[in-house]
């Protein structure tokens, strides 16, 4: 059995968090390790192609081969995608997430009594990488603290975070040929270790991408305005009318923000159409309710 940190330190940190009302990264009630709660789901099998949208999204498989280290854990590591917690990965387990194309930021944190970080400070970040995924493709992410995979991914540069360390991107051939993923069991969600995996999170990804890109454009807009001021292409407001002034000509960032908003509006409209169609299908015809 292994207890890596002091219980008293965790108690002090938890008390500080709840008393101060601080933003906190945590997996309290979800981080039960394999020593206390071994995985008992079905053996590994790929999900059916009809169970995910191959035309629009990508599929991530996460798996953790058996090791004595992992089987002795009291608490299991937390897996975050784009700073959202989805599951804690226990010994000899696998799960999956359907994600939107683009850059997906994956972080693994080791909790202490469920606590993992305060504000922007991570107490125990043990893996941090960005993986670019394409629609229609399947990716395999292997987590193991003891032994590396039999081969690194050929498409990754040697310095890429997912080419070394405990969390690595591997090919299907490596995942299957080594037999490691085939011996894992599905990470069920239950009362002792609930999780939010084995689902599509593509809509959440799209929403998060929109918010992040908009924030980036807001910062870029401030920089563009400052550059125009220095170049004498910005009219300052008069002292007697503070609501005037502005850039001479259209800002490039304003144009890009408008394009982003228009694109996201189309996404929202499509979602509303799907919801309306589903509701109409459930209601059925008024003259033939069966």
Image (tube, rainbow, N blue to C red):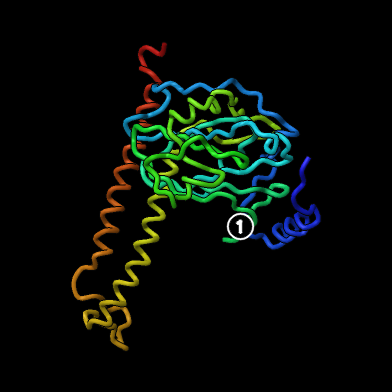
Q: Residue at x 25, y 77 (%)?
A: 228
Q: Choose top left, top right, bottom left or bottom right for residue 230.
A: bottom left
Q: Position of residue 225 (x, y in %)?
A: 29, 74
Q: Nearer the viewer, residue 203 or 3?
A: 3
Secondary structure state at the residue bearing disc 1: strand
Q: Nearer the viewer, residue 159 or 220?
A: 159
Question: Is 160 drawn above or below residue 280 in the view shown?
Answer: below
Q: Which quadrant of the figure contains the C terminus?
A: top left
Q: Choose top left, top right, bottom left or bottom right for residue 182.
A: top right
Q: Seen in the image, is 205 located left or right of residue 41? A: left
Question: Is 89 drawn above or below residue 129 in the view shown?
Answer: above
Q: Residue at x 29, y 43 (%)?
A: 266
Q: Position of residue 132 (x, y in %)?
A: 38, 45
Q: Nearer the viewer, residue 78 or 20?
A: 78
Is residue 34 among what the camera can see?
yes
Q: Seen in the image, is 63 located left or right of residue 172? A: right
Q: Position of residue 220 (x, y in %)?
A: 34, 67
Q: Residue at x 73, y 61 (%)?
A: 16
Question: Is 254 drawn above or below residue 69 in the view shown?
Answer: below
Q: Which quadrant of the figure contains the N terminus?
A: top right
Q: Residue at x 35, y 29 (%)?
A: 54
């Amino acid at each position: 059995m292994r207890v890596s940190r002091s219980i008293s330190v965790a108690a002090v940190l938890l008390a500080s968090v709840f008393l101060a009302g601080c933003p906190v990264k945590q997996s309290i009630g979800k981080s039960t390790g394999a020593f206390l709660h071994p995985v008992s789901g079905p053996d590994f099998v790929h999900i059916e192609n009809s169970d995910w949208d191959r035309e629009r999204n990508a599929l991530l498989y996460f798996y953790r081969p058996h090791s004595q280290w992992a089987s002795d854990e009291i608490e299991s590591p937390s897996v975050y995608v784009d700073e959202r917690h989805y599951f804690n990965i226990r010994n000899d387990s696998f799960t999956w997430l359907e994600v939107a194309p683009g850059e997906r930021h994956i972080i693994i944190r080791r909790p202490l009594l469920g606590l993992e970080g305060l504000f922007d400070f991570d107490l125990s970040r043990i893996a941090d990488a960005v993986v670019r995924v394409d629609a229609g493709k399947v990716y395999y992410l292997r987590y193991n603290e003891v032994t590396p995979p039999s081969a690194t991914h050929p498409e990754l540069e040697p310095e890429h975070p997912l080419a070394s360390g405990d969390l690595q991107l591997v090919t299907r051939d490596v995942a299957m040929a080594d037999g490691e993923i085939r011996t894992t069991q599905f990470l069920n969600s239950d009362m002792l270790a609930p999780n939010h995996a084995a689902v599509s999170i593509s809509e959440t990804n799209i929403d998060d991408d929109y918010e992040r890109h908009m924030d980036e454009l807001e910062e870029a807009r401030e920089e563009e305005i400052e550059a125009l001021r220095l170049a004498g292409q910005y009219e300052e407001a008069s002292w007697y009318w503070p609501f005037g002034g502005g850039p001479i000509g259209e800002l490039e960032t304003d144009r890009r923000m408008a394009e982003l908003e228009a694109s996201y509006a189309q996404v929202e409209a499509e979602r509303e159409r799907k919801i309306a169609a589903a509701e109409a299908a459930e209601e059925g015809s008024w003259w033939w309710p069966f």
